[in-house]
Image (cartoon, grey):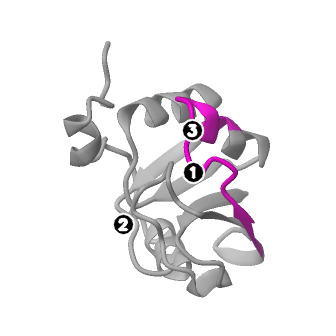
Amino acid sequence: MRIAISAETNNGLTSLVAQHFGRCPYFALVDVEGTEVQTIQLIENPFFAGHEVGQVPGFIHEQKAEVMLSGGMGGRAIQFFDGYGIAVATGAAGTVSAALEAYFAGRLSGAAPCAESIEHGHGDHH
């Protein structure tokens, strides 16, 4: 399984988790078997400077990720991930390694649009 994690720095498992999914400088792509990390690769977010709605979830989908962990994410992004069948969990903090541990322990699950996203009108509009 491949897990993508928004990251502030390019330091492997010790990279800090980014709190803003779309505006993070890097994504950690972690291949796991069970709860064992097999490989980790950090890639630059090509949309760091700015993005259209849906571009970043599309990019993560192209990386073959099945799970996306982040500190926070807007409602529209969550909808795009749902459409791709990618599980999303927000509330990740600390290092990439800590976020993975929290996810495997069941402490990270589900996503809710962050308050900032709702304030900016990026929430769900059904």
Amino acid type at image mark 3: His
The amino acid marked with disc number 1 is Ala
Residue at left 31%, top 41%?
113
| Residue at the disc numbered 3 | 51
> Residue 56: horizontal and vertical position, in percent?
61, 41
In this rendering, does residue 31 appear at all? no
Question: In which quadrant will I find the N terminus?
Answer: bottom right
Q: Quadrant of residue 31?
A: bottom right
Q: CA distance from mark 2 to mark 3?
A: 30 Å
State how far apart marks 1 and 3 are (Cα): 7 Å
Label 1 element class:
loop
Using a 10 Å C-alpha cutoff, classify the residue at mark 1 as few (fewer than 14 neighbours), some (14 to 19) or many (20 or more): few
- Of residue 70 and residue 24, the one placed in the foreground of this image is 24
Alpha carbon of mark 1 to alpha carbon of mark 2: how far? 31 Å
Q: Is residue 110 above or below residue 108?
A: above
Quarter where residue 92 is shown: bottom left
Task: Report the side of 82 relative to 75 (left or right).
Answer: right
Q: Which mark is residue 107?
A: 2
Work out whether 83 lies above or below 22. above
Proximity of marks 1 and 2: CB atoms separated by less than 8 Å? no
| Residue bounds of the magenta highlight | 40-58
Disc 2 is placed on an element classified as loop
Q: Nearer the viewer, residue 123 or 32?
A: 123
Give the percent coordinates (x, y) of residue 77: 48, 35
Bin the neighbour count of mark 2 within 10 Å (Cα to Cα): few under 14, some 14-19, many 20 and up.
some
Residue 43 is a magenta residue: yes
Measured from the top left, where is residue 118 in percent x and y? 23, 36
Marks 1 and 3: CB-CB under 8 Å?
no
Residue behind mark 1: 49
